Amino acid sequence: MTPRSEPRPSNRIALASLILANLVPLVGVFLWDWNLSDLLLLYWIENGVIGIYTVLKMLTSSVPGLGKLTNIYRKLQGVPFFIVSYGIFWLIHGLFVVVLFNRGGPTIPVQPDTFFFAAVIVSWMRADVLAWPVIGLLLSHGVSFVSNFLLGGEYRRQSIEVLMNQPYERVLILHLTIVFGGFIVMLLGSPQLVLVLFVVLKVVIDVQTHLREHAKANRSLSTPS
């Protein structure tokens, strides 16, 4: 058995891909003149990516002992509920980010019927600079999904209820990081060095959250039934 103090090989691969994807914004800061708005939009989109993979986890989860029909019933209940609740949470979070930190970014849509989707619209307007980093995040979280959840066996021990709650903890930590770091960057005028420190802080938080999340899953897997 792999010692608990050391990540499994699959977890190390996922961790490396996570760090690599999170360092892409540094290229944006130095080569593409990204500002705070671009960084925060990317991190908000990442929360959507996390939601997508959470749905995939819920669909592929299969806890032994519950029975096939029970697993299917829980998915039929849990997946639609999560999509609606997390989707609303994600859109409100995006609106908050755009309203507070959109300095120097595209004009915010103000029509009553589109304002709730402001972050989606602004992100689409910035698709030329956000597309490749978003693809990197999709691949990074995809590597973790395949290597840890499927091949690592986490799908056998993580129930629908546990999976539904996971993204909220991660997003809450990321949200607090964004707010704290974002206001500091705004106060200091968004120089490159401060933006770099902001990216590094986000990477550190992400790595810690990733390790804690999968260590908890590994403890579950190592517990005898």
Image: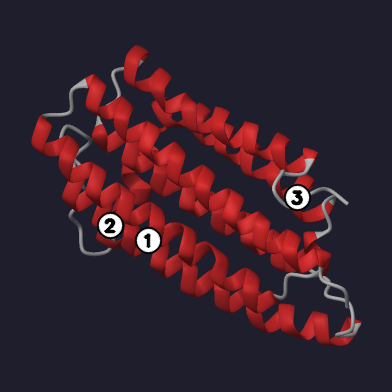
Q: CA distance from mark 1 to mark 2?
A: 6 Å
Say above or below: 143 vs 54: above
Q: Residue at x 74, y 59 (%)?
A: 218
If you read the primary sequence from the N terminus, does the residue marked by circle 3 or circle 2 appear first? 2
Q: Secondary structure at mark 2?
A: helix
Residue 100 image label:
none
If you read the primary sequence from the N terminus, does the residue marked by circle 1 or circle 3 appear first? 1
Q: Which residue is mark 1?
A: 91
The count of marks equals 3
Q: Are marks 1 and 2 in contact (CB under 8 Å)?
A: yes
Q: Which residue is mark 3?
A: 148
Q: CA distance from mark 3 to mark 2?
A: 32 Å
Q: Is residue 76 left or right of residue 23?
A: right
Q: Secondary structure at mark 3?
A: helix
Q: Quadrant of the C terminus?
A: bottom right
Residue 95 image label:
2
Query: Label 3 crowding class (10 Å Cα cut-off): few <14, some 14-19, many 20+?
Result: many
Dot in front, 3 or 2: 3
Q: Residue furthest top?
A: 31
The quarter holding residue 13 reads: top right
Q: CA distance from mark 1 to mark 3?
A: 28 Å
Q: Residue at x 25, y 51 (%)?
A: 179
Give residue 27's position: percent from left, percent from top.
Answer: 42, 18
The disc labelled 2 sits on which kind of residue? Leu
Answer whether residue 195 is visible to the viewer in this image. Answer: yes
Q: Is residue 214 left or right of residue 42?
A: right
